[in-house]
Image (cartoon, rainbow, N blue to C red):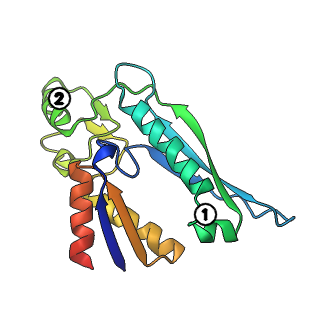
Amino acid sequence: MTAHVTSWRSAGRLGLFYSALVVLLHPPAPASGGPSNLTMGIFLPLTGAKVLSKEGLAVVKWTVEQLNRDPTYTELRKHSLFFNYLLEDTKCDSPSCDDVCRLLGGQARIWDVPLISFGCESSILSDRRRYPTFLRTTGTFDEMQQFIEKILTHFGWNRLTLVHGQDTVWLETSDDFQVRR
């Protein structure tokens, strides 16, 4: 597998998947041979004090526009594939920063109350002795590289360009890809 890693500083805290659950629903190809739509389910916390999801939504919109308009995606054009998305507000107001999750996760253990995060990816938080009441709706740093590799294998792709921000999860993932090639 060939890996090309690019840092996209303007993406800031967003990353490729942005701590959002993205599910591709593959409809059968239309019998008429017309265009096929691939719908992504995007779950983001859009209400509350966090503005990160508004940035994430902007990235989703931009990405879908690029996929649907850019003529350089020849395979998409050849098969008349087009992307759209359905958006759902998770209304999650939990911490999304690893440092905050580590601090609050320790307190949650003492108080024996659950703490659920939609964005803390640090592998340290998987330690059940230190964080027995911590749960997350996203994967860990360790799982990100495996997740991306499974997608590449599933579709038979052998090249990767990883565009990422400066978040630890993406720096570690890109480093892992560079070491493996």
In percent of width and height, residue 143 lies at: 31, 59
Q: Can the viewer see residue 131? A: yes
Q: Position of residue 120 (x, y in %)?
A: 26, 41
Indicate whether 35 appears above or below 19.
below
Q: Nearer the viewer, residue 28 or 66?
A: 66
Q: Is residue 27 above or below residue 180?
A: above
Q: Nearer the viewer, residue 105 or 66?
A: 66
**Measured from the top left, where is residue 114 in percent x and y?**
27, 29
Q: Amino acid at mark 1?
A: Pro
Q: CA distance from mark 1 to mark 2?
A: 47 Å
* Among the 4 quarters of the image, the one containing residue 4: bottom left
Q: Depth check: 34 or 95 in front?
A: 34
Of marks 1 and 2, which one's residue comes earlier in the chain?
A: 1
Most foreground residue, 34 or 48:
34
Eye-nearest disc, 1 or 2: 1
Residue 56, relative to residue 165: is it above or below? Answer: above
What residue does disc 2 label?
104
Name, please, the residue furthest toward the right: 32
Task: Say whether residue 132 is visible.
Answer: no
Q: Give the residue drawn at x 21%, y 66%.
A: 175
Determine the residue positioned at 46% across, 45% down.
Answer: 21
| Residue 156 point in image, percent of width and height | 51, 78
